[in-house]
Image (cartoon, rainbow, N blue to C red):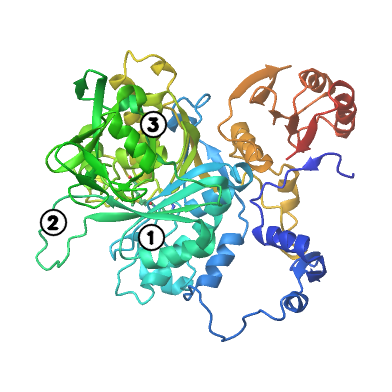
Amino acid sequence: MTEIFEKLDLQTPDFVDENIAKLAELFPNCVTEKLGDKGELEHAIDFDALRQEFSSSIVEGPAERYSLNWPGKRKALVAANTPINKTLRPCRKESVEFDSTKNIFIEGDNRDALKLLQETYLGKIKMIYIDPPYNTGNDFIYNDNFTADKQEYDEASEQKDEEGGRLVANPDSNGRFHSDWLSMIYPRLKRAQSLLDEDGIIFISIADHEIHNLRKMCDEIFGENNFIACFLWKKKGTTSNVKDAQVSSQTDYQLCYGRSKNAKIKQRFRASSDRNYPHVDEDGSYRTTVIEKKDSGAYKRDTMKFEIIGHKPRLGKRWQIGIETAKELENKNRFIWDGEKILQKIYNFEDNDTYSAQPNILDNCGTSASGSELVNDTLFAIPELFDNPKPVELLSHLSNITLENDGTILDFFCGSGTTAHAVMQLNAEDGGNRKCISVQLPEITDEKSEAFKAGYKNIAEIAKERIRRAGKKIKEDNAGKEGIENLDIGFRVFKIDSSNMEDVHLTPDDTKLELFDALEGNIKQDRSSEDLLFQVLLDWGVDLSLSIEHTEIDGKQVFFVDNNALAACFDKDINEEFVTKLAERQPLRVVFRDDGFANDAVKINIEQIFKLKSPATDIKVI
Ligand SMILES: C[S@@+](CC[C@H](N)C(=O)[O-])C[C@H]1O[C@@H](n2cnc3c(N)ncnc32)[C@H](O)[C@@H]1O
């Protein structure tokens, strides 16, 4: 029977296809067709034709060119573009306020997570903050197996994460030291870039080991023109006691790029109402500002008054006022000579708000020590639970110079969950609506570590518990504050897992007879309706944090997402009576399981029922 309803394809997008589509828009003549692996026709690029389009300015073969290259780069790019057959499975019992929260916690490898988020969050993220492993030689980095074959890689490490994926130490004795790290970060940044909104901004914490490579990589991925700053965060104020160290590094970099020219760091704002006016005279309260040092040439002082010499004097370092204004100020008695310098009086009633550029040095944004103290001492009382969490103040500052008091922040190396903590803290302070998506690998903790001894078998466990404790503490610390009861301290936990669907993408050669029975119900046995619901949301590009209501209609379980944005029913034996009632609610989209209809006649009638009762509804099946 021909398909009546369109089937959701339940795979992450294929970025190669998207790239071909983009090229086809510009150069339709360069897109051709070829036979794919399964014998079907697919689009491909005709490079000879494309080369013709650029015949006078093309670099090929061994010709020298400016670029960042390393062994494994091509494989890393393929890894960034290849679709995956995975999904996000909701986990209610580890979540907080599952039904209402707007925050998301994803447990799993961030490369998969970034691909799974593409449909839903493409161009929607306002700020990304990441703090990846710095490649110090002691870091464990996730080995995507780009650079080594399986045997080499099995020998290289005993470390495994919960899903059997390997985490390998990257010691600098490793010949592939930089290459491994670059291959790890490249596909992740590629996929992160497309999630940023046009005015979105990314910050990447990094140290001396990889800043040079990372900056070049970001120039390539985000565009050199979109470089905003390389902030220096002052992480400590004391020098280290390491005997053989020559220089004590007291800063980390926060490399910052915008998605486009529309991305702007906010200027530093100082409201006049926030200033102090410590002096008083007969005209009112005033503050002073230095406008001219002794004998600097623009003014000359005789015994009684200042004499203006020259034209358009530059007053102080920042001010440039015309000679007329200067004379006027002098006539109004606004200058004071304190024996050393000329001061200008500024009265509270005439003061202005001021804006200035953000300094690239981030001082007073917490320290490594204060970050550790908050997590290890205050929240958990377990010394050395988590190494070097960033301080909440750093994340708050980065957020404050990027966002108003809303927007989604993504942290896909979330570690102990500092970004999620900062988001709740800022919202508590100003009643804002910022939301956070955190991603963390269930990286196993060492058996000898304090974390393991305290029962935290992996880092994702630490992060979830930290966010729970932080949320509770923020509410307690702000008890009595108006509206604090509405603060969102929840998060929806998702775990990355294989697709909910049986593998039906088989070539005829792969197909065994026994499979046909299994294919009839194409959904895996162990998957719940809620699992299916979220896979549909992902595929349809519907926000994963929208509210969900569970209802029963005619004894069938129905999910309504964001009121009527989507209705889903994955029960079996769907019949006309039930569908009529559902259609009366006029959902924008509706989804059923393909094998959920009582019989083929129902399937055909459903289309008619919706045409009559709710013609705008888009109907799909999985
Ligand atoms: C430097 S820590 C981040 C610390 C964090 N900023 C904080 O304040 O707690 C980097 C984290 O990234 C995690 N990580 C490494 N590779 C990952 C991957 N492929 N996917 C998700 N997380 C990963 C590590 O487990 C580690 O916890």
Measure the alpha-carbon separation of dots 3 and 2: 39 Å
- Give the residue drawn at x 77%, y 60%: 25
Q: Earlier in the sequence, mark 3 or mark 2?
A: 2
Tally of numbered discs: 3
Q: Position of residue 326 (x, y in %)?
A: 33, 39
The residue tagged 2 is 239
Within the image, what quadrant is residue 21 found in? bottom right
600 vs 295, left or right, is right
Q: Tag 2: residue type? A: Thr
Q: Tag 1: residue type? A: Ile
- Give the residue drawn at x 75%, y 51%: 516
Label 3 neighbourhood size at 10 Å, few (<14), some (14-19), many (20+)? few
Measure the alpha-carbon separation of dots 2 and 1: 28 Å
User: Does the image show residue 366?
Assistant: no
**Front position in the image: 3 or 71:** 71
Label 1 neighbourhood size at 10 Å, few (<14), some (14-19), many (20+)? many
The residue tagged 1 is 141
Q: Is mark 1 within 8 Å of ligand 1?
A: yes
